[in-house]
Image: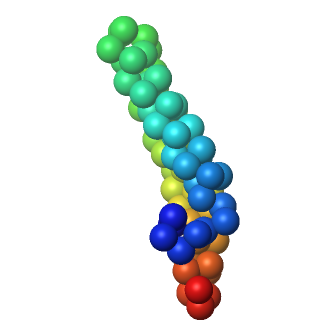
Amino acid sequence: MEKIKFPLLNDQKKMHKDIIAILTQYKADIANNKNILSLTITTELKKWFKEHMLVEDMKYAEYFKKPH
């Protein structure tokens, strides 16, 4: 993304940082014996795949197809 100067790179980085923070928090909660439904984690991951990979990453794919 950096190599082709993708204009939404900073947004991409923030979204990745955000999902990592969410999953890290779930991991910490589980380690601290907090009750977290697997459905909660599954829902968050489904949301990520639908919203990020199928929408945000497609913006990159379209930009990548253009001549640079």
Please give left or right for residue 22 compared with residue 55 in the image.
left
Q: Position of residue 13 (x, y in %)?
A: 55, 49
In front here: 19 or 47?
19
52 relative to 15, above or below? below
In front here: 40 or 32?
32
Within the image, what quadrant is residue 28 found in?
top left
User: Which residue is at 42% across, 28% downward?
Assistant: 24
50 relative to 68, above or below? above
Instruction: Residue 25: tell me if it is visible.
Output: yes
User: Which residue is at 60% across, 68% downward?
Assistant: 6
Please give left or right for residue 20 compared with residue 14 in the image.
left
Q: Position of residue 7 (x, y in %)?
A: 67, 65
Q: Position of residue 58 (x, y in %)?
A: 59, 72
Quarter holding the C terminus is bottom right
Within the image, what quadrant is residue 27 found in?
top left
What scheme was used to colour the molecule?
rainbow
Q: Position of residue 9 (x, y in %)?
A: 60, 58
Number of on-image labels: 0
1 relative to 24, above or below? below
In front here: 60 or 39?
60
User: Which residue is at 52% across, 46% downward?
Assistant: 16
Within the image, what quadrant is residue 55 found in?
bottom right
Instruction: Residue 55: tell me if it is visible.
Output: no
Please give left or right for residue 33 compared with residue 54 in the image.
left
Specify the farthest residue to the bottom.
Answer: 67
User: Which residue is at 36% across, 8% downward?
Assistant: 32
